[in-house]
Amino acid sequence: MSYSPDGQYQPPYRPEGQNPPPRPPYGQQQGGRQGQPQYAPQGGRPQPYGQPPQGGQPYGGPQQGRPPYGQDQYGYEAPTQAQPRFEQPGYGQQYDRYEPPYEEEPPRRKSKAKKWIIAGVSVLALAGIGAGVMAYLDIPPFSDKGEAVSFGKPAGGEAGGKQAANSKMSMPTNPTAQFKNASTLSDGTHVAVTELDGKKSGFKGKVWVWAPKEYNDPKFAKSGFPVMIALPGGAGYPVNYWMGTDLKLQASISKWYSEGKSKPFILAMPVLNPEPDKGIYWDGSDIPDQPKMGTWLTDDVPDLMRENFRTIKSRDGWAFMGSSTGGFASLKAVLKYPEKFKAAICSGPDIVPDSPLWKGHDKEKAENNPEVLAKQLIDKKGSPDVYLAFQVGDNESNKKTLPDVQKFVATYTKGPIHTTLRVIPGGEHNAKTYVPNMGEGPIEFISKVMEGPVE
């Protein structure tokens, strides 16, 4: 609807002589609903239909100057050839606008640029997924597994470099072992593996090693580090389960060191048995007519570490740890060779040898019995002190494990034998129980009496 300047009604322009739809009564919205006008001029009183507000200015008309583009002089939309003019609703009215007949547009074709973008994103996504899979499967170049690993040159750059006569550290004597990366930790350190042909035992098997990041820190370039030989439970063959990162032994050592609980141990993780056990363990011992696994663990593996790492000359830098069968082998190694090793963490260990391979070899079996070895150590004058940290869950699968360890601690904690026992509430017979709880006392117990890093 439009108004002339004097306020008289002018029929709206309609193309092709079309008539406007009938107008509903004043105050009634389309659909017959009664109601108050939606707008009243200043003062609050609505104006009669068809009349401008006080002052004579049409509704929506321009205040001054030129009307906006696309509007007539009164502010209503001006007709064009391409667009028919629609009647504006009067005061208090609303009704649907006239729409030209709808014609469905044909589907738009995607631009070539958009197609290339989608294709590129898809290729990158597939490449990322593929790289992740290949890294998980240790396929080069997305994995560094199998690459050669060097654990740093000794001070001076050569094996057997000069050092002070009173030095507590031992330079690598002959670093000839070829280490291959087995896994890389988040801090950039490596678990590496080598095949060790034991000169003293005659046994050939794998040993995994790990050195903390401090080992390659320039401020420790002339320092020897303590070594912990970590033994698994079960067969411990063909892998030592400490070598992976799932149990987080390596990461835990670094964490405990940063918290002041632990020494920055280098880890040696050898196989424990010479072959799959098939229900038979070798007890980490030299059982007659069997591979000499006791010599392998207590001579050949330490020799490998001395040849390839900066270590500590004295027993103050050498320890064992293990769970279950590995706990037994660790306990026995320290009690049998206290001049070589100072401490052990024994988790859920057996206390006496129980391999059926001992049958007919009672004398040798007694020589590898921790109870017998502990008594001999106590009875012998001048025996070196040893430190044994036990931890056992109160929900072990073998219900004799906890009482057997408690009995051993009560009986043999005297003289040179120092012990501590942590009972883990709800703890089960597995490494997932033992590793986190090592940081709750056992690792601190042995670290207080060990040395390193030292020059």
Image: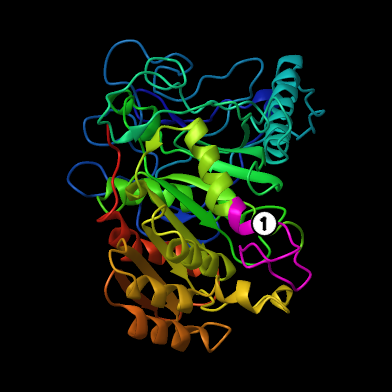
Q: Residue at x 82, y 28 (%)?
A: 106
156 to 198, vertically: above or below? above
Mark 1 crowdedness (10 Å alpha carbons): few <14, some 14-19, many ≥20: many
In this rendering, the count of numbered labels is: 1
Q: Is residue 387 left or right of residue 199?
A: left
The region drawn magenta spans 277-296
- Answer with the quarter of the image where residue 116 lies: top right
Q: Residue furthest top?
A: 66
Q: Is residue 432 left or right of residue 411?
A: right
Q: Is residue 176 left or right of residue 120?
A: left
- Answer with the quarter of the image where residue 164 lies: top left
Q: Give how far across and how far down residue 246 sits, in percent.
A: 56, 54
Q: Give how far across and how far down residue 44 sits, in percent.
A: 21, 49
Q: Tell me if I can see residue 185 in this picture.
A: no
Q: Residue at x 57, y 27 (%)?
A: 149
Q: Give how far across and how far down residue 35 sits, in percent.
A: 39, 61
Q: Residue at x 71, y 20 (%)?
A: 114
Q: Is residue 136 left or right of residue 154?
A: right
286 falls in the magenta region: yes
- The overriding secondary structure of the stretch rendered in magenta is loop
Disc 1 secondary structure class? loop
378, 283: nearer the viewer: 378
In what quadrant of the picture does the C terminus appear? top left
Q: Residue at x 40, y 24 (%)?
A: 4
Give the amino acid type for the residue marked by disc 1 in the picture. Lys
Q: Tell me if I can see residue 177 in this picture.
A: yes
Q: Give how far across and how far down residue 333 sits, in percent.
A: 49, 61
The residue pinned by badge 1 equals: 292
